[in-house]
Amino acid sequence: MNYKISFLKMTFAASLALSIFSCKETKKEETTVTKEEVPMDSTDLALLELDLPEGFKIEVYARGIDGARSMAMGDNGTLFVGTRTENTVYAIQDTDGDFKADNVIVLDTMEVPNGIAMRNGDLYVAQVGSLWKYPNIENQLGKTLNKELIYDDYPTEFHHGWKYIAFGPDDKLYIPVGAPCNICNRTDEDERFSTITRMDPDGSNREIYAKGVRNSVGFTWHPDTQEMWFTDNGRDMLGDDIPPCELNHVTEIGQHFGYPYCHGGIVKDPEFGDEHPCSDFVSPALQLGAHVAPLAIKFYTAEMFPPNYQGKAFIAEHGSWNRSKKVGYRIMIADIKDGEVMDYEPFIDGWLNESTQEASGRPVDILWLKDGSMLISDDYGDAIYRVSYNGTALSSN
């Protein structure tokens, strides 16, 4: 197979013990290092093979971002990027405003720093079992790093242990704890398994926000209702077509979304399904394709894209790894009205060559720039892309 099988690195990563520090410990690191520049030539990334709606174009924003995963934007325009198995946190700058990175910095090296978030100039980075804060991070670039440990007592199981984190409209930090397996029930060992948790920015007042969540690597809040919407990756080894992955909608704290008893609201688990019927749980707002591996979800509230995109949710389908015919590898759009999904269709397709079954990219995260354009991280192409819309060019065709 010709695509990156990053999960094969999990065995090595799981063997590394996480460093343990006391809470609120401050740690100084070596000065950040500028990464060797990679040419911006995009021919090997096969961007010309991608299908986009008329009037849209996709270009390379940054290259050589090995394993690019979660993204967060600083107030001064620095893009911070986390990774999963590459153990690197990047700081990326576009100093001349041409929407192409001209300075790529290796900010820090740590184990599984997949989850990152910004708040009031501070960068938060989540490892599997710990969370760090880099105060006033953009003023630290090029200097000796100072960072503070917020907690180091979350579960350390690597399986689904990498984090996606984000601050909600309530100014709380939301942190999922994936199931430490393909299918199991270990909440009797730690009630945080298979949940989404939340806490204050200093790590206090922790609580479980949503239960029965197998592995969410993307969530956001509706711009009008402020309610959470999250993606969840369905279990493996039940065949090509079941169970569906999920798009879920949280309407109150403590709701249970079915794992490990029921999948997609319709599939009774062969091992745990007899313990609870599917009717006991919140059904997905939308059943997604089996094994498409949905990650980021972001609502569009900017002004560059045409008005018909306003308020729609964009979802990154990272793509299948254990299906006989691959699926996913695309950016989708969900039209959501009054809490209901009215439509679900491709926005960018073509990272998967259907005839050869070879992938040229695997989208992970989505972020909006101030001008309303879209950034997409790709942990297969080791790149960040920018998607923009030119209405003038469209009208002149």
Image: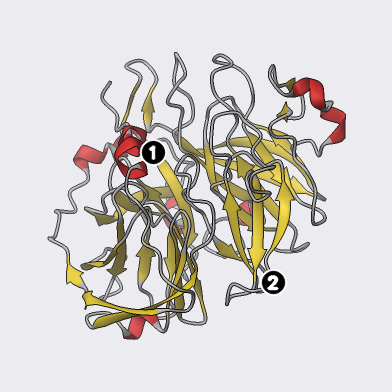
- Residue 4 at what x, y percent from top left? 29, 33
Along the viewing direction, whichever of 149 and 329 lies nearer the viewer: 149
Residue, far right: 279
> Is residue 6 at least partly visible in the picture?
yes
User: In the figure, residue 287 lies in which quadrant?
Assistant: top right
Is residue 256 rendered to the left or right of residue 168? right
Question: Where is 86 relative to 52, above or below?
Answer: below
- Residue 40 at what x, y percent from top left? 19, 53
Q: Residues within 10 Å of mark 1 (few under 14, many from 20)?
A: many
| Amino acid residing under circle 2 | Asn
Label 1 sits on a secondary structure element that is loop
Q: Residue at x 49, y 41 (%)?
A: 53
Q: Earlier in the sequence, mark 2 or mark 1?
A: 2
Residue 362's mark?
Answer: 1
Along the viewing direction, whichever of 102 and 220 lies nearer the viewer: 220
- Residue 258 at what x, y percent from top left? 74, 35
| Amino acid residing under circle 1 | Arg
Question: Where is 324 relative to 213, above or below?
Answer: above
Question: Where is 102 relative to 355, above or below?
Answer: below
